[in-house]
Amino acid sequence: MAAILGGGLGGLSTGYYLLKNNLNTNNNLKLFLLEATNYCGGWIKSIKTKDYTFELGPRTIRPRGTTGLNTLNMMQDLGLSEHIVPIKPDHPAAKNRMIYVNNHLHTLPSSFKGVFQKNEPFTKPLIYALFNDIKQPNKLLEDDSIYNFVERRFGKEIADYAISPMICGICAGDAKEISVKFLMKTLFEWEQAHGGVVKGLVRSLFKSSTDKELELTDLAKKAQEEKWNVYTVRGGLETFPYTLQRYLKENNVDIRMDHKVDEIEFIDSSTVKLKNKAGNKIVASHIYSSIPAYSLAKLVQKQHPDLAQDLDSIPFVTVGIVNLYFATKASLISPAFGFLVPPIENSPILGVVFDSCCIPDQNGTVLTVMLGGKWFKEKFGDNCTEKQLLDIALKEIKSILNINDVPTAQNVNILEKCIPQYVIGHYERVDKIRQYIKDKNLPISLIGCSYDGVGINDVIYSAKTQVIKDCT
């Protein structure tokens, strides 16, 4: 019997891939999924009404790369193809992505032509960044922050106005702390091996790809052919984990809600006990842990304090989410995906997503304001209330977007320790954690955003990778 810890997207995806492997190998594997709350789906939550949809966590998914196409394969297998709503290259949400600098909104270049034009707040066309890379000397490093790397190769403006706000949007983090391997591992490897990004790119053009191609479903092929920018699910992104949960139940996975585990005891290489304070025990042959690293650290602390220490050293940040709905006939915003705010602006907000442009079936104007992240405590202190975040969000959109209307509906969430930070040395730390598990022959696999990527696609692919590894 295998036990899955956590009913977020990582845990649900693990159950999905274990079932698929079960069918392929004709094994009779009993599966348990243990979720500490009364909800499966993790941070993916949607509030759906006839007039608007509020996404309390992620709202769109990127379809590109192996991980993105893999998710689309899963979507089709779950019967969600007809519910997918893509944003294609000609959509305003694909073309218009902005940053807020010096009290003005600036649209970032979205075409090849734009790279050769001067666009504020940049003082030169972005093509000059490549010339900067060519003339910069090599610097041999094991790891570096993504900010330092980009500043070194492409210049300070690119680091401040392109990369720093991007990191805020992806993981609510500080680019000066996040590892370059988080987003630019290949570019960093080109610098280290060939002395620069452009030099590495040129050499790569003459090498044949060794990547194993993913067998694509019709939905994944369509996304490639139509060059989708991002996509969402009609009715709210919550539909995705809900459908996964239903699939698991239909295939006899024992899903136990409100089942908190307080301690894990490893008996031997094929026996592990999951205990709670009420004295209940579940014995399993293997655990798939998709809960945050800091939560797992508490469960293994008694038996494996060194492992717990390494798990607990992966930092997480808290993000405030303010959803706003304005029941207006005319839109209060220009069509765009939204805007991000670079950290050098010292703003209390990370950015604003224009949901009424990105999400279908919205009436009026729908916005999501993101606050805090790496700077949550610095900006809002230890006892921040939802009312404080709402007031700050309304003040900022009034100042930046000139919206003076009172929202018709609103929702405020403080997502405590919701996004891991892949700081310098993260990947070496994760390797050390997994090596400890291997050396001690512990029957546990680590899944999800704490280790293998913070995005939806990364979490799903992490589950697939670990299941395949354990079943071969």
Image (cartoon, helix red, strand yellow):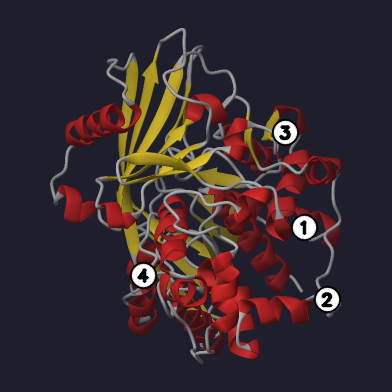
Circle 3: is it few (<14), some (14-19), or many (20+) Cα within 10 Å? Answer: some
As measured in the structure, the alpha-carbon distance from the residue carrying label 3 to the one carrying label 4 is: 39 Å
- Gap between marks 1 and 3 measured at Cα: 22 Å
Mark toward the start of the polypeptide (1 vs 3): 1
Q: Position of residue 39 (x, y in %)?
A: 45, 38
Disc 1 is placed on an element classified as helix
- For disc 2, the marked residue is 210
Residue 31 seen from this side: no
Q: Would you name the residue on which mark 3 appears?
A: 80
Residue 89, by quadrant, is top right
Q: Find residue 233 and report its horizontal and vertical position in percent.
A: 63, 32
Look at the picture and state if 221 lies above or below 67: above
Dot 1: within a 10 Å radius of its alpha carbon, few (fewer than 14), some, or many (20 or more) residues? some
Rendering coords of residue 137 (x, y %): 53, 89
Q: Return the residue at label 4.
A: 176
Closer to the observer: label 2 or label 3?
2
Going from N to C along the chain, the mark reached first, 2 or 1, is 1
Q: Is residue 382 left or right of residue 166?
A: left
Crowdedness of circle 4 by 10 Å Cα count: few (<14), some, many (20+)? some
Q: Earlier in the sequence, mark 2 or mark 4?
A: 4
Which residue matches tag 1? 22
Is residue 39 visible in the rendered image? The answer is: yes
- Please report contact status of discs 4 and 1: CB closer than 8 Å, yes or no: no
Q: Is residue 239 above or below residue 436?
A: above
Precedes in sequence: disc 2 or disc 3 = 3
Residue 214: which quarter of the image? bottom right
Q: CA distance from mark 2 to mark 4?
A: 33 Å
Which of the 4 quarters of the picture holds residue 82? top right
Q: Nearer the viewer, residue 121 or 6?
A: 121
Residue extending furthest top?
A: 329
